[in-house]
Amino acid sequence: MTATPSARIDAIRRRIFGLRAALPTIAITAVAFVIGGLFIAATGRDPLATYQAIWVGSGLDWLRPGASAAERTTSAFALQQTLLLLLPLALLGLAVAIPFRARLFNIGGQGQYLSGSFAAVWVASTMPSLPGPLHIVLAILAGALVGAIWAAISGWLRAVAGTSEVITTIMLNYVAIWVGAALFGIGGPLQNSAEPTQPVSDNVLPSARLPVIWGDAALQGLHAGVLLLPVFLVGAWLLLHRTPFGFEVRAVGANDEAASYAGINVRRRYVAVMALAGGIAGAAGSLDMLGWQYRVATADLQAFQLGFLGIAVALLARNNPIGVALAAFLFAALINGSSVRNLDPTVFPPELAGNLTLLIQAVIVLLISLDLALFRFPKLRRSRRTRRNQEVMA
């Protein structure tokens, strides 16, 4: 059946509108890199050469057709590290983007990731008699379940007491850190018994480790967990846009009072959407533990910052699940490409490059916040007032 001319015109309009909606995000990213370039120039370095060095350090040079065999080997290792970082960043971005559709701001990706990793490493370091595939699946599910419970606490408090999820999720982040310190610290109930002087967990058993699909496992090669990322991204998009649950979540986000009047259980949706987000963040912790970290070290708990960076990923992606992948890849390439290990020190000092990455991230968040405050939210408030006036007139 051939499409009618009007259908073709509508399809073209949708494509144009989609590109137009992406233009502010592209412009914001470009401005952030320009400001970063000014910062580089202020240090007496060449901005273009620095960005090229970050490109090479992130492993993206692996895609260059004329690269030599030695360059491809080095770039392959760097690109594996970028993709390892992409996976948790994208999942933590989803953990922020999905609740935001219900006008819930999940700042607790940090705690949900950590609590999920605790559960996963406990399951993965015990039960040695389980077959490998079952052991992996159980460990991932355990992490997702605990992460979901961790986030559902904030959703339940919002539903029954009206408590701000921003406050409760931030508080639960710190609770997760100190729970981990108590569990795996020296003398803790889950501390590694083979290393009594080290505040770490038991190691993940070989049967529960995800297989490496690219690179060397001893050098943190890319594990098979990354293959689940498209499943999460496409599944989240379908859930939000092609299911009754997604429609109800978006309805609650648009107007919770109208949604309740229409028969939607708003309280239940608050708990469910937060649990879903926590499950995704907990799964991210599970995949990192089973894929390359293999144990929890209490010294790293407070230094872990990817949960907060997931907020920037979701903001840059405009809470679109597919856009989350692109935003996460951008941040992963920036972080890995500017690391001390990968950035060429003759081009730009690696100790300053970390500040450059933070500057670009901060500018992106600031500009997106200004865009929302000055243009998006006033337009949304005007449309809501118009609908209320029409309802009153009717």
Image (cartoon, helix red, strand yellow):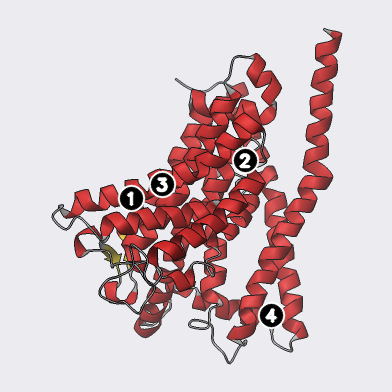
Decide which of tag 3 and tag 2 comes sooner along the chain.
Answer: 2
In the image, what residue type sits under mark 2?
A: Phe
Decide which of tag 3 and tag 4 comes sooner along the chain.
Answer: 4
- 49 in relation to 213, above or below: below
- Closest to the camera, between mark 4 and mark 1, is 1
Secondary structure state at the residue bearing disc 1: helix
Q: How far is mark 3 from mark 4, CA to CA? A: 44 Å
Identify the mark at residue 47; answer none if there is no mark. 4
Residue 40, given in percent of the width and then of the height, sits at: 71, 81
Identify the mark at residue 177; answer none if there is no mark. none
Q: Which residue is mark 3?
A: 146
Q: How far is mark 1 from mark 2, CA to CA? A: 25 Å
- Closest to the camera, between mark 1 and mark 2, is 1
Decide which of tag 1 and tag 2 comes sooner along the chain.
Answer: 2
How many residues crowd mark 4 within 10 Å: few (<14), some (14–19), many (20+)?
Answer: many
How many residues crowd mark 3 within 10 Å: few (<14), some (14–19), many (20+)?
Answer: many
**Which residue is situated farthest in the bottom direction here?**
346
Residue 368 horizontal side relative to residue 84, left or right: right
Secondary structure state at the residue bearing disc 2: helix
Q: How far is mark 2 from mark 4, CA to CA? A: 36 Å
In the image, what residue type sits under mark 4?
A: Pro
**Residue at 48% from the left image edge and 33% from the top image edge:** 239
Q: How far is mark 3 from mark 2, CA to CA? A: 21 Å
Residue 365 image-quadrant placement:
bottom right
Residue 231 image-quadrant placement:
top left
Question: Which of 51/244 is in front?
Answer: 244
Q: Which residue is mark 2?
A: 100
Q: Which residue is mark 1?
A: 140
**Which residue is situated farthest in the top direction here?**
394
Decide which of tag 1 and tag 3 comes sooner along the chain.
Answer: 1
Residue 146, given in percent of the width and then of the height, sits at: 41, 46
In the image, what residue type sits under mark 3?
A: Val
